[in-house]
Image (tube, rainbow, N blue to C red):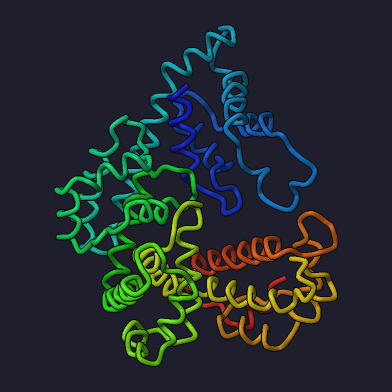
Amino acid sequence: MKLFQDVYSSYQKRFRLAETSGLMSFNAWVQFLADCPGYSADKASFALAKEISVDQHRHLRHMALSWSEFLVAVAAAVWLEPSSGSKELPDRLLDFVLDTLPEALHAGRAAEIQEAGDLARDDPRHVELVRLVTRIFKDADVDGSGLLTSEEFQQAFSEPRTSAALEEAGLLTGDMKLLFLRMDVDGSGSLTLKEFVEGLLKLQNEMIVLDKGIREVRKAFLKVETKVGIGKVNRENFLAFVRNPANADLLKRAGLRESDASDLWEAAQQAISRDPRAEVTAEALVAGYMDLHLEKGRIIRAMNFLDSIFQVADVDGSGALSKAEVGKYLCRKEVTDKLHSLKLFVPDWLEMFEAMDADGDGDLTWAELSVAMRRIWTQLAGAEAEAPGNSESEDEEDSLP
């Protein structure tokens, strides 16, 4: 069974769909079959394994396989393959497990190594770092699964030799748990070689560009911590510190305005959001600072702004907005102007109300609103990044349906 799990984990991380994190996409399934010697990419096996629900028209869940569906799809592929001869299905399945599955896993891992190497193709300066990171990954992958778990990751980075080699390459890795969460973009709890290499290359680039600001943000947190005590830094005392006129220069040196302080704290909380026991630390604040300067920074700022509008609009304290309240508060010019300034798509709030109201109760909670808008903006940002030239105008964004 472990062999099946390794194959599923490896391929589901390739050819991902934004809405199907943690599942194996249709394209990943087709690639898996292509890597299976003697098997054709028969799409019927995918269809036979799917459990289609009537509400799946709203997202792309119908284009991905869960773990149980993957097992059914494998059996369907073996059953449908005409080249298997006259053997009974159990014998054919056994041949597939013993002979074909290991070859597919080997092909998948070889492709990952190739993809990781390709990341350095555009910048010769990255070649040595990619080699270093690839070696660290292989040494850390003690079970040979082709994936790094959080435990393997932290064990590898606790080695003084590893930390020293990365620091020499210009990487200060900081909080290992937080670094793992930032690299594990699909939240699966494990990293492929490509995710590992991409994560460290991205970290290196961010630290080069934002080096001075990172130092200032870390310094600000440590000053607050010295004043209020270790483990006692919260949103209120941090914002009070950075908004004190005596500390204005510190924000300025980090390239931040006073109005950015709230966004910075929100970004730090976002960075640790997948660990319910985590508290905002200096490293979390640094991660949030770097996120604010990336593409996702626009979305973090927008979500923080929408949250403030939601709190004002929720006059009865019910935790939800009616359609009338959405029209009264979210359709205001200040909301439109703010989203325009962030170069984000401005939806027709009333037209989209029913689509965002996931439980159909006629009210919109903050969870429903934030999930819907984060998904829309993230998908549009991804589409812009992949578009040739990456030069969509603001007017084009506003005209999206």
Which quadrant of the view contains residue 401?
A: bottom right
Q: Residue at x 40, y 72 (%)?
A: 289
Residue 70 vertical position relative to residue 217 in the rendered view, above or below: above
366 relative position to 152: left or right = right
Residue 243 vertical position relative to residue 323 in the rendered view, above or below: below
Q: Residue at x 55, y 33 (%)?
A: 41
- Residue sitting farthest toward the bottom: 245
Of the pair 231 and 176, the residue shown nearer to us? 231
Of the pair 42 and 224, the residue shown nearer to us? 224
Instruction: Give coordinates of residue 286: x percent, y percent.
Output: 36, 68
Of the pair 148 and 250, the residue shown nearer to us? 250
395 relative position to 33: left or right = right
Instruction: Give coordinates of residue 275: x percent, y percent.
Output: 48, 52
Which quadrant of the view contains residue 362?
A: bottom right
Of the pair 74 and 287, the residue shown nearer to us? 287
Instruction: Give coordinates of residue 159: x percent, y percent.
Output: 19, 45
Quick check: can you spot residue 138? yes
Residue 45 vertical position relative to residue 384 in the rendered view, above or below: above
Quick check: can you spot residue 209? no
345 relative position to 391: left or right = right
